[in-house]
Image (spheres, grey):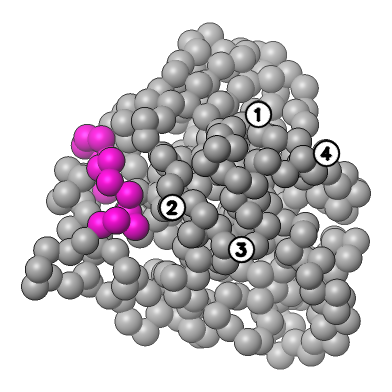
Amino acid sequence: MSLRGAAGRDVNVETEATKQPSIDEEIASLALTDKEELIMNNKYKSVPVKSSEITPYSQYLSRRDFLKAAGIVTGSALFAACAPAQRATETTLPEGEAPVIPTGKMDELGDPANSFEDITNYNNYYEFSVDKEAVNPLSKDFAPAPWTVEVHGLVNNPQTYGIEDLLRKFPQEERIYRLRCVEAWSMVIPWTGFPLASLLQEVEPTSDAKFVRFETVYRPEEMPGQKNPLFPWPYQEGLRLDEAMHDLTILATGLYGQPMPNPNGAPIRLVVPWKYGFKSIKSIVKIELVAEQPSTLWNTVGPGEYGFYSNVNPERSHPRWSQASERRIGEFDRRPTLMFNGYAEQVASLYVGMDLVENY
């Protein structure tokens, strides 16, 4: 793996931000430290996420125990068989054993990392609730199995995969990515998954395919937020084909070596670490190759606030708040936001010649 970096936020954004009417004044009044100013002066600086930035893991099985239980090959962290049907939140430890808990976790600036509890208990997932802290309890009865993903459209080899097929067919690897929410908060998350490019290569996009469209499952009986008539369900997102084929773009099937928890998008989600988190659509059931730029939920609801590209850009403010800095969950002070969330060296070439303020 050529890079360890950051990953996408939870699918939805706007309403939570409006609960903080003073955010513009708060961010505008911030004084950056000398170290932060140095980083901000180099907007294309890519800061790799240290393994020490991973959130402490105290609620689930250790990675070693999970690999053994799931039949995953160690070393390259491959799933050799189907993931356990049991939800990660229901996993229990054998009596007398305890998970290996990392200690002294710090971010790249030497600040404490956020906790694992935050990753699974602070989520934008409007299919369940507009309240971040309500998503976890409301998602407990969501059934991530059985599950299929249809890959179709402008391809030579359309496929429908069971989640067990994806786990078996595509080598799973760990990617430690930063997640930058459009609401100006962030996390660091150790995802398990595989490059989206691997799947797309198998279905063979035709020469007419220019974009990739993604769709979330529609189950209002299990996802009460989908009964909200203010949103055009099901959730849809899209990428340019070259963005989808980039090595940093993954389909994530888990985190911390566990099957993907329900509040984080079980059983499979997109992760595009250089874009705001709402681009990383959750609980995917359809992937379609198309010729024209697809509609997306947030661009449809708020086209002046949420663009199709939605690359992390500290120089392009949201109409209602600055994007120049962010709050790492679990920290009090703010930190500067890096261009492309710190992945500029890897992805800036995708946007050569583009006005990144205009094409937000």
Residue 67, which numbered label? none
Residue 50 shows in this picture: no
- Kind of residue indicated by mark 3: Lys
Instruction: Decide which of 146, 77 is in the foreground and name it.
Output: 146
Give the residue number, with chain letter if any, for mark 2. Answer: 140
Query: Sequence-wise, which precedes: disc 4 or disc 3?
Result: 3
- Residue 130 magenta-highlighted: no
Q: Which residues are magenta?
A: 77-91
Mark 2 and mark 1 in contact? Answer it, CB < 8 Å: no
In the drawing, does residue 83 fall left or right of residue 246? left
Residue ID at (58%, 75%): 329
- Residue 82 magenta-highlighted: yes
Crowd tier of the residue under label 1, counting other residues whose Cα lies within 10 Å: few below 14, some 14–19, many 20 or above: many
Residue ID at (25%, 42%): 84
Mark 2 and mark 4 in contact? Answer it, CB < 8 Å: no
- Kind of residue indicated by mark 1: Arg
